[in-house]
Image (cartoon, rainbow, N blue to C red):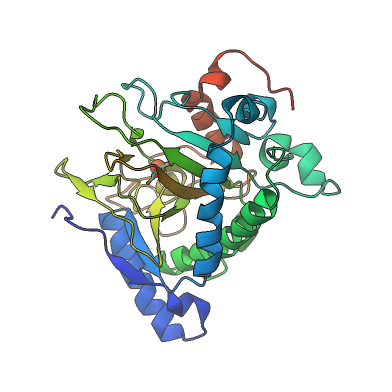
């Protein structure tokens, strides 16, 4: 049956040691991942003050003059970090560009870490705006919290797949995770369905941890093709499965189409963090996901190559033959 709402799952067991409670959570998670591909979590361990303070940085950053933001355009980075202006992304290839601005950071490794020199596209330096005191520390702190939550989610997904809780640790302990501050202007008046906040798409990585501030816009498409609202719920994150995880689970877990359209009359901010595996992890059907009625569907692929290929298809600057100048 097609889903009509997105379930809210209590994530508290993953912060404790009660094995039976973790098993019960894993069963709920498995149902949500196989039937919907989307769920909310509450009691996730991330402090509400950290979330609120990070959202408070959004109007500061997006309110900067355009030329200041353009100085840190993503094309100047090696790792897809920095600023993307309105309409420069097109997540739905049949549409005319996304009506949002973005500020991205990726998983920056210390200069002494050989991964940084070896894989600058994944672990190179982030770009930061000048003249915004406190911005970097705040966004870095939120990113660190997403890393911790991401590792806990990987543990929960392992249990949901009947794998040992630490199965993903060596495969995803340096995840190639991009986090974005997104700003959606309100679309007042008639909306061109080919130009909305973010066009219908599925995410590329293993899973996404999305925090919405207060303005609703997100919708998720069910198997009947109906758009189901996923409004902001204070104290929760929306988690959704991405294409990399769908592929890794041989399509046992669903990577579901979604979109965002802000017609609220107010600016909307959201913060998705797209959590992948380590870049050199081979993505091939996980144990238990190939069965007689579900033969292996995909050849193995390196996670890093897969995600870079998907980013290439989305960003205008990556299609212009422009090399990043770092
Ligand atoms: O802003 C939102 O609610 C959704 C964002 C999203 O789907 C994305 O950035 O991939
Ligand atoms: Fe998305």
In terms of depth relative to the viewer, which is nearer, 18 or 4?
4
Q: From the top left corner, tell me how far across and down residue 133 is, in percent.
A: 70, 49
Q: Is residue 105 left or right of residue 91?
A: right
Q: From the top left corner, tell me how far across and down residue 126 is, in percent.
A: 70, 40
Q: Quadrant of the C terminus?
A: top right
Write the residue at 41% across / 64% down.
161
Q: Residue 144: which quarter of the image?
A: bottom right
Write the residue at 69% across / 40% down.
128
Write the residue at 48% across / 33% down.
101
In terms of depth relative to the viewer, which is nearer, 292 or 175?
175
Write the residue at 14% across / 43% down.
224
Q: Residue 226: which quarter of the image?
A: top left
Q: Quadrant of the N terminus?
A: bottom left
Residue 59 in view of the camera: yes
In the figure, 193 relative to 34: above or below? above
In terms of depth relative to the viewer, which is nearer, 316 or 184?
184
Quadrant of the displayed image that contains ligand 2: top left
Q: From the top left corner, tell me how far across and down residue 199 is, in percent.
A: 33, 32
Q: How many numbered circles are shown?
A: 0
Q: Residue 264: which quarter of the image?
A: top left
Q: Is residue 140 left or right of residue 255?
A: right
In the figure, 66 relative to 53: above or below? above
Which residue is at the far top?
321
Residue 276 in view of the camera: no
Which residue is at the far right?
112
């Amino acid at each position: 049956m097609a889903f009509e709402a997105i379930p809210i799952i209590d994530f508290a067991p993953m912060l404790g040691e009660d094995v039976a409670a973790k098993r019960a959570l894993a069963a709920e998670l498995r149902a949500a991942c196989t039937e919907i591909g989307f769920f909310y979590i509450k009691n996730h361990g991330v402090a509400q003050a950290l979330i609120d303070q990070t959202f408070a940085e959004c109007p500061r950053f997006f309110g900067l003059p355009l030329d200041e933001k353009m100085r840190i355009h993503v094309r100047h980075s090696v790792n897809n970090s920095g600023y993307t202006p309105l309409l420069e992304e097109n997540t739905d290839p049949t549409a005319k560009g996304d009506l949002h601005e973005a500020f991205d950071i990726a998983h920056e490794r210390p200069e002494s870490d050989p991964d940084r020199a070896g894989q600058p596209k994944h672990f190179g330096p982030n770009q930061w705006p000048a003249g915004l005191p406190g911005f970097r520390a705040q966004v870095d702190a939120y990113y660190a919290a997403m890393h911790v939550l991401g590792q806990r989610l990987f543990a929960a997904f392992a249990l949901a797949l009947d794998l040992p809780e630490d199965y993903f640790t060596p495969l995803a302990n340096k995840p190639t995770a991009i986090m974005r501050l997104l700003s959606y202007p309100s679309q007042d008046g008639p909306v061109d369905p080919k130009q909305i906040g973010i066009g219908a798409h599925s995410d590329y990585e293993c899973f996404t941890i999305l925090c919405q501030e207060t303005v609703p816009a997100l919708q998720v498409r069910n198997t009947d093709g109906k758009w189901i609202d996923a409004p902001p719920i204070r104290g929760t994150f929306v988690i959704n499965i991405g294409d990399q995880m769908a592929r890794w689970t041989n399509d046992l877990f669903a990577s579901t189409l979604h979109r965002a359209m802000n017609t609220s009359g107010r600016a909307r901010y959201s913060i998705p963090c797209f959590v992948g595996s380590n870049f050199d992890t081979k993505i091939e059907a996980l144990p238990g996901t190939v069965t007689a009625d579900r033969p292996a569907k995909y050849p193995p692929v390196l996670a890093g190559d897969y995600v870079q290929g998907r980013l290439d298809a989305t960003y205008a600057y990556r299609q212009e033959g422009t090399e990043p100048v770092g």
